[in-house]
Every structure is written in C-alpha cells, then in structure tokens.
C-alpha cells in the first residue's frame, strides 16, 4: 500500500497541473502524452529542471537548522543544503522555494507530491527508510550537556561528581532516562515537552544541565557566551539526510552526487561557510588521494 | 527588566505579518461560514427531505470530527483523489466547511426556537413564505442566534492557529519562529496570548453590544 503511493507520487504532480489546465478529456490526454514524452522517465529531477526551481519541505522554528534570521529570511544548515542543491540544478542557489512544515508533515508532504525533497534535520532510521529514500548524510548530530554560567556545576566532571545532587532536563521521550544516564548515571532527570522548555528549566535554575542536541548547544554558546557553557561531553550519533520519494533513482543519485561534490569535491564553499556560521566549527580539511567519503 | 521589555517589543515586527494572516483567515472563515451556514440552517428548518438529509449528515459528520482531522483529510487525502490544493486554499476550505456545519446548527436552532404561533399569525395576515422569513421569523431568531454565534467566532479565531500545521505563517507559527531563533519561549508566548486575548475580548464586547441592541425587538 505504502509502496504504491510512493510509486505514484512523482508523476501525479505533473499530471495534476495539466489536468487542471485542460478543459476536456481529449485535451487532457494529448497534453499528458506530450508531458510524458518530455519527462520520460518521470523523475523529480526532470520535473524540477522543467519548473525552473526546487521545492523543498523544511521548518522555520529550529536554530541552527532552519529558522528566520533578524531580517525575517529563512536561514540555517538545512537551508544552506537546499541552496547547494539549487546551485547544482540551476547554477543559482536562490532558485528554491521553501514549503514550511512541521516535523510530523515531512513524510506526508513528500509522499503526496507537495515537495521535491525534505531537508529538515531528518534522522535516518530503518523504519523511515521503508517509506522514503535517504540521501547520503550531510551531518552527524550528537547530544551534549548545556550548563549555565551562573549554575553550581559547569563541566561534565562537576556534574558527575555531584551525583544525585545534579538535576538534568531533557526532551520527553521513551529513552530520555537512558539518554541522561549515559552521560550522568546518578543525576535526577526532569522530562519536558520541548527542547526550548528543557533550556528554560536551565535558565530558571530548576535544572543544572540541559541534555539537548549538540548543534543547539554550539549555537546557544556561540550566541550567548556569558550565559551558557558547553560541559564538554558529547555523545550519541544520528545521521541527518535528505529524504526523497521511493523509486526515483535519478533524483536520489543527483542529490548524492551534488552532496559529495559539495562536501568532498571542488565546490565546498557553501557547505563550509554554513558549517562555520551554524556550528561555530572549522570544517575538516580534505586531502587528495584515497577517497574517504 | 527593561532589557526583557525591549526584547519583547523587538519581536513585534516579526509577529505582525502572522497577526495579519490570523485576522485574514478568521475573517474569511467567519464571513463565508455565516453566509452559507444561515442558508443551510434555513434549509434544515424548512427544506424538503432531499435537502435536509444530506445537510443533516454533513453537519453531524463535520461537527463530530476534530478540526485537525478535517484539515489533514483535505490537505493529504484529496491529492489521492486528484485534487492537490495549495496549503492556504486547503486549510481555508477545511475551516469554512467545519465552521459552516456549526453555524448551520446554530441557525436552525434559533429559527426553530421561534414559537409556531408566530408563523401561524404571519400566515393569517397573508404573508408568503419568504415574507414570513424576512419580516417575522429571522428578525426574532437573530437574538437567539447571536450569543452562540459569537462563541463560535472566537472559536474560529483560536482555531485559525491550526493553519500553522500546514506551514502557513500565522500568529502562532510567527511566535514559534521567533522562539526558534531566540530560545526565549516565555515572553513570546505571553505576547501571543495577549494578542489573541485582545482580539477575542473585542469580539465579545462587540457581541454584548449587538445583543443589547437586538434585545429591543422582543416582546
């Protein structure tokens, strides 16, 4: 059932548009034949090229991944990756339209053909890979402990030494207790409904450390160096990839190729700049010779 | 404290476009649902069976379904039937359909609450059906229609925040976007709540005035 829907996702989009334009059935069928001749095989790659812009599903409420800057423009690592794809397609990083969506809408919007791909800090998992195809990863996320410069405990060692005297706030999750225990085996755990509220608990002194995404820790410490500290302990890994509809080899292959060229090849400028801007880290040096990719 | 105040004031421009979207969506939903809903309500009260039965089913199904499910059905299920609507038309259609179901019931109830004697008296002086409706039944029903209808209007304003689920930047999503950038949830949520309160408090004040005005018509 799911596979069938995914099969039909890509061609439906172009058919629909034509269907809306055509007044009669006869007109519709000739128009559809023309489209089929142009776009055979019906890949999203061909559809995006014909359209002249890329349509990307992403969010707007999570720095440093996808958020509005002080001018109200979408920016972030996910947005930079979308621009990398647009440059690959049209030689113009601005030919991209962003469809704002909740994380829960990532797969539905993709499967119903509303977007060409999802670039929205999407963690690769085998369960999701049964519904969509994932590109190569463009980032590996981790977990870290954010502490307050006004707090009792600032480093991971101080938190460990405090034992059960330390309180850690974390995003509510089935594995939240285990996640905290891996870093602070004895600490008291405070589960909260959003990552922002976990940070709020640290701000208001209810928690000594917030157990949150490594990228968020980097972002907050960079922006508020006198307010927040990185305790120095980083652990867990999860892969972030671009998701596309299944059975579209050309499109998936194009995305992988473009990411490889922009992460390891001769066009690393956009990726590296985003890496510096959003993670406050220098991107790794690439060396000629054996391809470590 | 002045720093926090300056911060909240600084976020207002970001919320402004969202507020306009919230007002726009609410206005469209309220106007369309009252026009269609009153017609449906009249049909529910006086219509022939072939008009009443489908409307009865429509109103019962829509009123018994969570608004979220209606929005997702139109946005995600209709594409499989060949109708792939853009986010704004899709969500407006869902909100109007949902609100119309409620308004039609409010209208039907208001009309049927007018005693049969009024209709009989109007018939006795020779008024036609449409004259009875226009001069006797509807003017009296307005009084009974207004209070529940204003409740449903404030509900529409609050319900409009669900448009953010399909990525339309209304007041709620605009607030979340500022939080996503600043990681300062409390002041922003308070500001958004205050704005919703101002809108809805104005509406209920307006409603009290309207009710006071139409109260003159009675006995």
Image (cartoon, rainbow, N blue to C red):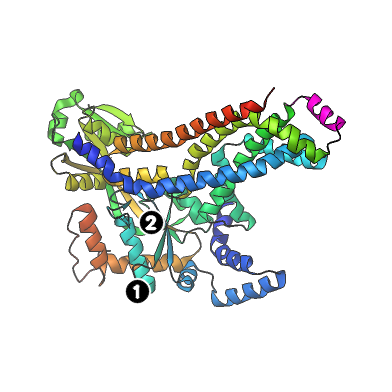
- Label located before the other in sequence (2 or 1): 1
Q: Nearer the viewer, residue B18 or A4?
A: B18
Q: How many marks?
A: 2
Q: Main secondary structure of the magenta part?
A: helix
- SS of the residue at dot 1? loop
Q: Give the class, few, some or many, for how many residues have Cα within 10 Å of label 2's Cα (few <14, many ≥20).
A: many
Q: Nearer the viewer, residue A100 or B13?
A: B13
Position of A223 relative to B81 (above/below): above
Residue A244 inside the magenta-drawn segment: no
Q: Which mark is residue B70?
A: none
Residue range (magenta): B114-126
Q: Nearer the viewer, residue A28 or B132?
A: B132
Which quadrant of the rendered structure holds the N terminus of chain B? top left
Q: Nearer the viewer, residue A23 or A254?
A: A23
Residue B124 inside the magenta-drawn segment: yes
Determine if residue B47 is in view: no
The spot of residue A113 in percent (x, y) is: 52, 59
Question: What is the CA distance from the residue labelled 2 to the residue labelled 1?
Answer: 19 Å
The spot of residue A33 in percent (x, y) is: 63, 75
User: Which residue carries the number 1 mark?
Assistant: A91
Identify which residue is drawn at 51% across, 47% down: B25
Q: Is residue B133 left or right of residue B5?
A: right
The spot of residue A176 in percent (x, y) is: 33, 34
Please identify the quarter of the rendering in which residue A79 is found.
Answer: bottom left
Label 1 marks which chain's residue? A
- SS of the residue at dot 2? loop
User: Which residue carries the number 2 mark?
Assistant: A119
């Amino acid at each position: 059932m799911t596979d069938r829907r995914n099969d039909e996702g890509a061609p439906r989009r172009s058919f629909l548009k034509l269907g809306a334009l055509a007044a009669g059935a006869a007109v519709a069928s000739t128009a559809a034949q023309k489209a089929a001749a142009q776009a055979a095989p019906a890949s999203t790659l061909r559809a995006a090229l014909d359209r002249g812009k890329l349509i990307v599903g992403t969010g707007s409420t999570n720095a440093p991944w996808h958020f509005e800057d002080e001018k109200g423009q979408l920016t972030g690592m996910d947005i930079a990756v979308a621009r990398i794809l647009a440059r690959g397609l049209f030689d113009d990083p601005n030919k991209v339209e962003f469809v704002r969506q909740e994380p829960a809408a990532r797969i539905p919007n993709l499967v119903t053909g509303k977007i060409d791909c999802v670039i929205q800090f999407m963690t690769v998992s085998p369960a999701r890979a049964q519904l969509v195809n994932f590109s190569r990863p463009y980032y590996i996320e981790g977990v870290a402990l954010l502490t307050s410069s006004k707090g009792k405990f600032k480093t991971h060692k101080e938190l460990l030494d405090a034992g059960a005297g330390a309180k850690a706030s974390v995003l509510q999750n089935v594995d939240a207790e285990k996640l905290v225990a891996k870093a602070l085996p004895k600490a008291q755990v405070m589960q909260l409904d959003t990552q922002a509220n976990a940070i709020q608990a640290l701000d208001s002194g209810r928690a000594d450390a917030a157990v949150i995404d490594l990228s968020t820790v980097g972002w907050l410490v960079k922006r508020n160096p006198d307010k927040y500290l990185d305790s120095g302990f980083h652990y867990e890994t999860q892969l972030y990839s671009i998701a596309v509809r299944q059975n579209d080899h050309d499109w998936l292959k194009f995305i992988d190729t473009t990411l490889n060229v922009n992460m390891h090849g001769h066009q690393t400028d956009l990726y590296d700049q985003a890496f510096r801007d959003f993670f406050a880290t220098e991107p790794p040096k690439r060396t000629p010779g054996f391809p470590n990719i | 404290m002045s720093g926090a105040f300056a911060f909240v004031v600084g976020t207002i421009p970001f919320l402004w476009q969202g507020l306009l979207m919230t007002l726009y969506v609410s206005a469209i939903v309220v106007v369309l649902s009252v026009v269609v809903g009153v017609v449906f309500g009249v049909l529910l009260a006086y219509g022939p069976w072939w008009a009443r039965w489908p409307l009865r089913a429509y109103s019962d199904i829509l009123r018994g379904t969570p608004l979220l499910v209606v929005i997702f059905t139109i946005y995600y299920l209709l594409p499989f039937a060949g109708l792939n609507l853009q986010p704004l038309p899709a969500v407006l259609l869902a909100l109007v359909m949902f609100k119309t179901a409620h308004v039609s019931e409010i209208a039907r109830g208001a009309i049927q609450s007018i005693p049969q004697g009024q209709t009989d008296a109007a018939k006795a002086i020779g008024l036609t059906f449409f004259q009875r409706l226009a001069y006797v039944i509807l003017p009296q029903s307005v009084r009974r229609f207004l209070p529940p209808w204003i409740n449903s209007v404030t509900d529409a304003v609050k319900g409009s925040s669900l448009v953010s689920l399909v990525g339309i930047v209304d007041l709620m999503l605009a607030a979340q976007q500022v939080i996503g950038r600043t990681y300062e949830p409390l002041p922003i949520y308070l500001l958004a709540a205050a704005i919703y309160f101002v809108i809805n408090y104005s509406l209920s004040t307006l409603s009290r005035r309207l009710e006071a005005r139409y109260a003159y018509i009675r006995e």
